[in-house]
Structure formats: structure tokens, C-alpha cells
């Protein structure tokens, strides 16, 4: 409710107090990103390798996200888990929807990506969600994201990932930009485009390239503001006889079994 009344800068200032209030008053172990958790083992957040990876990613992203990087550590943990699973699959990594790389920086640091024998392909316009491709029903939401968070970040992101020899940025409109690269086998696919049509086009393009055992992380599958995406993904899953799982983080997961 406060989110609707208070202006964004004030909400940002109040966020740490709100967090501690919930923690102290109600005994939550974790309260962020739409989650309030109690009685759960959160060792993963204290794991040194994960902690360092997250902190590193935060430092690379601190000036983005309107100056207030969302605490998506639980989502990042899921992404690191799915990316770790791909280490044994002898296939490439793909992220569609990168922005300034909050998830992908966490993964690259976590896996020490220079030591990984695969490539990591990062697809984005790197200048926000292209409105012409957005469905009328999602337009308001997308306009809001574009004005709040996205900017021409290509040179910044290029520079920040230049420490990795095997991370490749592909700038352009999805799905058209898929034609510019030759990717045959994928072991990790992350989709976070915040609009339905290119998300489905991504699944269509990569589904047959996913190797057996690969995991697809659908960043906003369970988010109530992304219901149009969910419906479109559910139809894709039905057509391909697969069942997505909704996680408490709001992410969805698919496993390629064949
Ligand atoms: C929520 S952000 C991604 C955040 C990112 N996963 C992270 O970890 O920080 C969504 C991104 O999708 C990109 N995007 C959305 N639709 C696109 C399209 N059709 N083609 C290319 N990029 C697109 C936007 O430019 C934006 O950077």
C-alpha cells in the first residue's frame, strides 16, 4: 500500500528500516523481493563463495536500478544453482534480458567463468524494452520499467564483462539478434525480458538446442504483474508436454529431459 502512496525516492530511503522492522517485530529471517521467510535455513546466503559473488555483482550494479539495487539474492542463488548444473553438460550458457548484469555477474563470479570451458551469451538491446514489439496489454508496465530503470548501458556492460574471455554480449532485438550467432548446444538458459512475445520466441528458438539436463530459469514467471507472460509460457509448456514449477521467489523453472 505504501508503495502506491509514497514517492519512489522516499520508499528507497525507508527500505532498510522496513526490513529491520519486519525482522525484529515478526522474526523474519529474510524479507525482500516479495518474500518473507521464517524458519528456513538460509545458509546459502552466508556461503562465502555466494556472498562474494553477490557483493561483486552489487558493486558492478550499484549505480543502476535507479540507485537502489533490488535484493534478489534468493533468485541469484537459484540462478547460480542452475548455472552450476550446466558445468557438466558441455554446452553454452545463454541469458536473454541482461540489463547491467545483476544475475550474470553473480554467476560469472560464482563459477569463476574464465575457468569454464563454455561460452556465456548475453542478449539484450542494452537500451531498454523495445516498445513496438510489446503487446498492448503489457505496454503500461513496460513503459514504467523503461522510464524507471533502463538506459543505454552497452558500453558500461561491455567494459564490466571485459574481464571474461568467454562472455559475449549480443546487442539487438530479440529474437532477430539470435541469427547473428552460432549457438548449437545450451546447458543454461535464463529468460528475463519482462514482455511475453520475445520470451516465447526465445523458448521457441532455444528449446531444441537445450541439451538433456539443461535448466531454464524464467525470472518473472510467478510474478503477479507478469501474468501475460505466464499464460504464454504455460501454453508453450502445454504444447511441449512439460510442466513448469513456480518457486517462492517468483521464478519459474523448466528442465529439459530429452
Ligand atoms: C528485467 S531486465 C533484465 C535484468 C537482468 N536479468 C539482471 O540480472 O539484471 C529486462 C531486460 O530485457 C531487455 N529486453 C526486453 N525485451 C527485449 C527484446 N525484445 N530484445 C532485446 N532485449 C530486450 C531490456 O532491455 C532489459 O534490459
Image: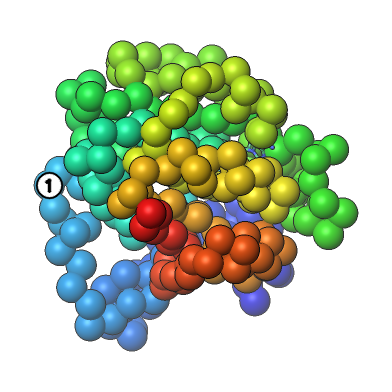
Q: Residue at x 82, y 51 (%)?
A: 135
Quarter in which the N terminus is drawn? bottom right
Please, what secondary structure does the residue beneath circle 1 have? helix
Observer-nearest of 253 and 207:
207
Observer-nearest of 2 and 253:
253
Asked whether the viewer can see residue 109, the reply is no
In screen coordinates, is 109 left or right of 244? Answer: left
In the displayed image of the protein, which residue is found farthest to the front? 258
Residue labelled 1 has its Cβ within 8 Å of some atom of ligand 1: no
In the displayed image of the protein, which residue is found farthest to the left? 48
Query: How far across and down, in percent of the image, does residue 190 sit?
Result: 46, 45
Query: How far across and down, in percent of the image, does residue 211 sit?
Result: 36, 43
In screen coordinates, is 129 left or right of 55? Answer: right
Q: Residue at x 53, y 19 (%)?
A: 181
Q: Determine crowd level at label 1: few under 14, some 14-19, many 20+ residues with C-alpha closer than 10 A.
A: few
Question: Which residue is denoted by mark 1 in the rendering?
Answer: 48
Q: Is the residue 13 above or below the residue 182 in the image?
A: below
Q: Is the residue 75 above or below the residue 36 in the image?
A: above
Observer-nearest of 82 and 45:
82
In the rendered image, which quarter is residue 42 located in?
A: bottom left
Amino acid at each position: 500500500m505504501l508503495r502506491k502512496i509514497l514517492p519512489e525516492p522516499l520508499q528507497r530511503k525507508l527500505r532498510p528500516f522496513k526490513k529491520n522492522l519486519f525482522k525484529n517485530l515478526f522474526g523474519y529471517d529474510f524479507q525482500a523481493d516479495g518474500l518473507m521467510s521464517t524458519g528456513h535455513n538460509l545458509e546459502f546466503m552466508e556461503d562465502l563463495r555466494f556472498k562474494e559473488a553477490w557483493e561483486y555483482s552489487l558493486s558492478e550494479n550499484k549505480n543502476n536500478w535507479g540507485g537502489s539495487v533490488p535484493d534478489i539474492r534468493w533468485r541469484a542463488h537459484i540462478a547460480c544453482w542452475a548455472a552450476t548444473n550446466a558445468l557438466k553438460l558441455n554446452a553454452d550458457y545463454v541469458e536473454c534480458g541482461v540489463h547491467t548484469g545483476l544475475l550474470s555477474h553473480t554467476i560469472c563470479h560464482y563459477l569463476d567463468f574464465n575457468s569454464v570451458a563454455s561460452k556465456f551469451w548475453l542478449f539484450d538491446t542494452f537500451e531498454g524494452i523495445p516498445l513496438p514489439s510489446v503487446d498492448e496489454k503489457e505496454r503500461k508496465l513496460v513503459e514504467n520499467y523503461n522510464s524507471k530503470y533502463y538506459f543505454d548501458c552497452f558500453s558500461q556492460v561491455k567494459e564490466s564483462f571485459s574481464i571474461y574471455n568467454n562472455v559475449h554480449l549480443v546487442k539487438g532485438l530479440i529474437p532477430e539478434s539470435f541469427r547473428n550467432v552460432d549457438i548449437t548446444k545450451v546447458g543454461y538458459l535464463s529468460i528475463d525480458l519482462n514482455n511475453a512475445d520475445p520470451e516465447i520466441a526465445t523458448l521457441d528458438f532455444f528449446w531444441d538446442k537445450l541439451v538433456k539436463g539443461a535448466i531454464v530459469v524464467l525470472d518473472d514467471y510467478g510474478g503477479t504483474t507478469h501474468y501475460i507472460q505466464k499464460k504464454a509460457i504455460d501454453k508453450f509448456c502445454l504444447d511441449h508436454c512439460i510442466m513448469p514449477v513456480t518457486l517462492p521467489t517468483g521464478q519459474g523453472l523448466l528442465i529439459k529431459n530429452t
